[in-house]
Amino acid sequence: MLLLENIPLAPLTTINIGGPARYFVEANNIGEVQEAVTFARSRALPLFVLGGGSNLVVADAGWPGLVLKVSLLGIDQQAGNDDEGKVLFDVGAGESWDKFVSRAIMARCGGVECLSGIPGSMGGTPVQNVGAYGQEVSETIASVQALDLKDGQVRDLCREACEFGYRTSIFNTTERGRFIVLRVTYALTPDGKPHISYSDLKRHFEGRETTPNLAETREAVRHIRALKGMLIVPGDPDCQSAGSFFKNPVLSEEEHEDLKRRAASRRLTVPSYPALETRKKVSAAWLVEHSGFAKGFGSARVGISTRHALAIVNRGGATAADVVALKEQIQQRVHEIWGIPLEPEPVLVGF
């Protein structure tokens, strides 16, 4: 295990913000993960596990303890199918998520094609139950291998044990801080048909006579993400973000009716998206834009993407304090106008 000190964390995040880690370890195998945990405990240091850095904002003061970057690699397609005829892929937590999606589609396996282009690493996908364009990873995760910090044992957790919900799992709710994800096994459908339910995807293929295949769906998703500044492109000012900063709120029937009444009083109609309506979700982007925060809003240092109302971008020299101030301004205004609390999607570290 190579132990480093005072390592800047900003370059390890997609928003390029944050102070240093007092100690830093990049673990390439389970033994190094266990050794890093032992070191942190022996010094009574707070431990933070870093993945691809795409869904977090690090405080300007950095992290006072040990930052552990889990870099276990490998994408192994198991021979044969499981009992349900699915193809199993066993993937290291440090692998690029989009690399795995590409490999799955090259193998003509469906189930993750709509999650193309999402930045970050494999280890974060079960934690957040990552989802986009009508798919969530919980639909295809078979099991998660994780180090249990309670007793130091490596455990294999089945899908049900992970208790997946909308952008949640036991890893970020009831058992937050207990597990370190090491590997994830996905069960994908051989020769599966692409999942095209999201309105953006439907519009993209509108008028087409033949059904798109998995590869065409992947490219369409990446194209749509690029148009919204949600595909990491070096040099693109709209890409220096932590992705979507707010979750789409899930409302009760009463809350949904109240939202429609408030919208009608302003001569507005709450947009209906079939992919959201199934769970009484509403568009956080619509709420943000109709609360006075148009695309491009902000200062020279921090603001909202010119292409997506949910992305808070570092325009150059922004601090974590700048990002949090804008986040709170948006949350307060949305709550004042619509009576709906917006929950941040990125992890806020060191605050």
Image: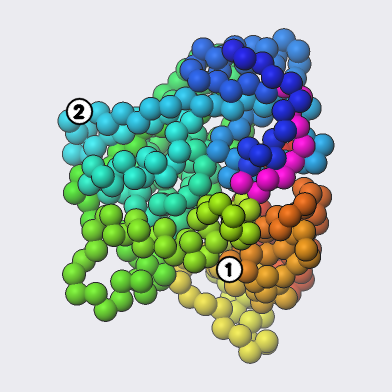
Q: Is residue 120 left or right of residue 221?
A: right
Indicate which disc residue 66 carries: none
Q: Separation of disc 1 and disc 2 at Cα?
A: 43 Å
According to the picture, the residue beneath numbered tag 1 turns out to be 307
Indicate which disc residue 79 carries: 2
Which residue is drawn at the image coordinates 70% and 55% (left, top)? 314
Percent x, y of residue 228:
53, 65
Percent x, y of residue 271:
52, 77
Q: What element does badge 2 sit on?
A: strand
Query: Label 1 amino acid?
Result: Arg
Which residue is drawn at the image coordinates 24% and 37% (left, top)? 87
How packed is label 1: few (under 14 Cα within 10 Å), some, or many (20 or more)? some
> In the rendered view, would you say 217 is above or below 185?
below
Camera sees residue 45: yes
Quadrant of the drawing holding the N terminus: top right
Percent x, y of residue 250:
56, 61
Instruction: Find the magenta span and give its range.
Output: 14-23
Which residue is drawn at the image coordinates 22% and 46% (left, top)? 108
Quadrant of the drawing holding the C terminus: top right
266 or 328, nearer to the observer: 328
- Tell me where residue 157 sits by quadrant: top left
Which residue is drawn at the image coordinates 72% and 76% (left, top)? 292
> In the rendered view, would you say 144 is above or below 102?
above
- Tell me where residue 57 sits by quadrant: top right
> In the rendered view, would you say 287 is above or below 50?
below
Indicate how the structure is coloured in the image: rainbow
Residue 287 belongs to the span the image colors magenta: no
How packed is label 2: few (under 14 Cα within 10 Å), some, or many (20 or more)? few
Camera sees residue 309: no
Helix, strand or loop: magenta stretch = loop
